[in-house]
Amino acid sequence: MKKLFFLLLTFTVLSACSEYQKAMKSEDIAAKFSMGEKLYNKGKYSKANKLFAQIVPNYRGKPQAEKLMFLYSDTYYKMEDYYLSSYQFERFVSAYPNSEKLEEASFLSAKSHYMLSPVFTKDQEETKHAIDKLQMFINNYPNSQYLEEANKMVQELDFKLEQKAFAIAKQYNKIAPHTGDYTAAIKAFDNFIFDFPGSTLREDALFYRLDSAYNLAVKSVEWKKQERLETAKSYYATFKKSYGDSKYSEEIAKMISDIEQELKQYGTNNS
């Protein structure tokens, strides 16, 4: 029985391969379309893609072209070739503005760009592009069945940009003891706080901004020291107002103690 089963399996596989190869070599574009759709429905996207690619030029202007182009575009998406799926879906949207598949194609095009977004440590141009595409989809289809997923993807991509901006600012803070340039770190954190006011990383950003300003002040030349101490003190006040019970409480307590001690020599009111 086992031998019979394997013989039947082998015969089925060889038959399917033979049928596919026959379709690939055939001049019958309808047969290619039929076989391609059959393979697509079975999840054989790479083979379906090869067949569709052969006949796409022949179907231009024909009624079946719309269906073919959607399936062709989707094979790229299913094969995780997101560069080509985004491109092909965009072509579909442009070519068939009245298609019943328009919303789905628009979403999959935008989602393809989302899938191309790299980890936050890398360049984020693809991420910004994906946000633009997803936002365009959300604006065009405010009642879409894909709206919730699109919004979640935008939030995820936005957080990548937050992580990237925060990592850059923190890197300035990290290298400042070696370069002596705490000003760059302060500016980077200022930009982060302004650009991402609701960020979950805001507490960390405010702390590292204070840390940078504190180090800039205490290590400053004398003629700039008082002004920089006052600035650091104002950053402390901002931090304390927002995060009275912070994980950084012990560290900032030492900072403000040092700042106020330094300010005494200038006769500054520390109340």
Image: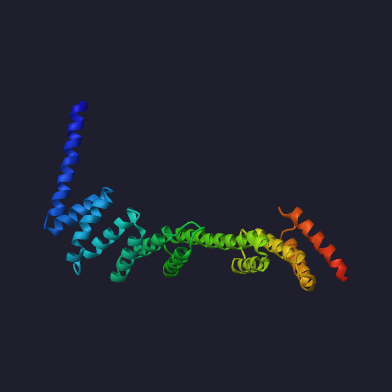
**Residue 74, horizontal then vertical, whole percent:** 31, 58
Left or right of 16 in this view: 116: right
Compared across the picture, whether 192 is left or right of 42 comes to right
Quarter of the image for the N terminus: give it: top left
Q: Quadrant of residue 162?
A: bottom right
The correct choice, above or below, for 245 with respect to 93 in the image is above
In the picture, which quadrant includes the C terminus? bottom right
Q: Is residue 271 visible?
A: no
What residue appears at the point 19 percent right and 60 percent down from the top-left corner? 54
Q: As rendered, which of 230 and 137 lies closer to the eye? A: 230
The quarter of the displayed image where residue 186 is located: bottom right
Closer to us: 23 or 143: 23
Q: Residue at x 75, y 66 (%)?
A: 217
The location of residue 241, given as percent across then percent down, is 74, 63
Q: Residue 172's image quarter? A: bottom right
Residue 99 vertical position relative to residue 77 in the rendered view, above or below: below
Extreme residue toward the bottom, this view: 223
Task: Give the residue drawn at x 64%, y 65%.
Answer: 185
Extreme residue toward the top, this view? 1
Whether residue 106 sits left or right of residue 249 in the image: it is: left
Residue 84 in sight here: yes
Circle count: 0
User: In the rendered view, does 267 fall on the left or right side of 55?
Assistant: right
- Front residue of 173 and 35: 173
The image position of residue 96, as x and y in percent, is: 29, 69
